[in-house]
Amino acid sequence: MNGSDTFDEVRAATTGSMTKAALVDEVARVSDLTKKHSEVIVETVFRSIIEALHRGEKIELRGFGSFRLRRREPRKGRNPKTGDRVEVPSKRVPYFKPGKELKELINRETATVPTPAVSSAATPSPPDPGFPRY
């Protein structure tokens, strides 16, 4: 992969899915950080979300969405191989609820969805009004 590849081209050339490696590559590309530093950032964000959920906390990312836990009640199930009845214990499962801004961005026409640009200047540029800052 060379520097002229766009993020969409890289993603489309792989599986058509966003992977953690593709996310690390994108963070490195837009921030002018090394892949190693970008990987630390992505891992830290994921680990922080997981640890907060483990503590039972709700994570709210304004404009993006929120993560929370839902409790599944215990139930009776069947072993698909033998057909025997088994008790399935209660468990907590993560749930993501997209925010209003994310829903709006997803449902825009592809040509109108802005992409964030990172300036190489020392002073940050004003935020693009069409793209929320998380």
Image (spheres, rainbow, N blue to C red):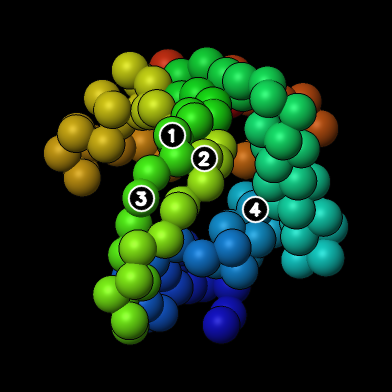
User: Tag 2, which secondary structure?
Assistant: loop
Q: Nearer the viewer, mark 3 or mark 1?
A: 3
Tags 2 and 1 touching, CB below 8 Å: yes
Structural crowding at the residue carrying mark 2, measured as other residues with C-alpha within 10 Å and reported as few (<14), some (14–19) or many (≥20) = few
Q: Type of residue at label 2?
A: Ser
Could you give the CA–CA distance between mark 1 and mark 4, rounded to whole angstroms?
Answer: 39 Å
Could you give the CA–CA distance between mark 3 and mark 4, rounded to whole angstroms?
Answer: 44 Å
95 shown above or below 32: above
- Residue linked to disc 3: 76
Question: Which mark, by number, is residue 90?
Answer: 2
103 shown above or below 11: above
- Residue linked to disc 1: 73
Q: Earlier in the sequence, mark 3 or mark 4?
A: 4
Question: Which mark, by number, is residue 132?
Answer: none
Residue 106, position as x, y percentages in the image: 27, 36
User: Tag 1, which secondary structure?
Assistant: loop
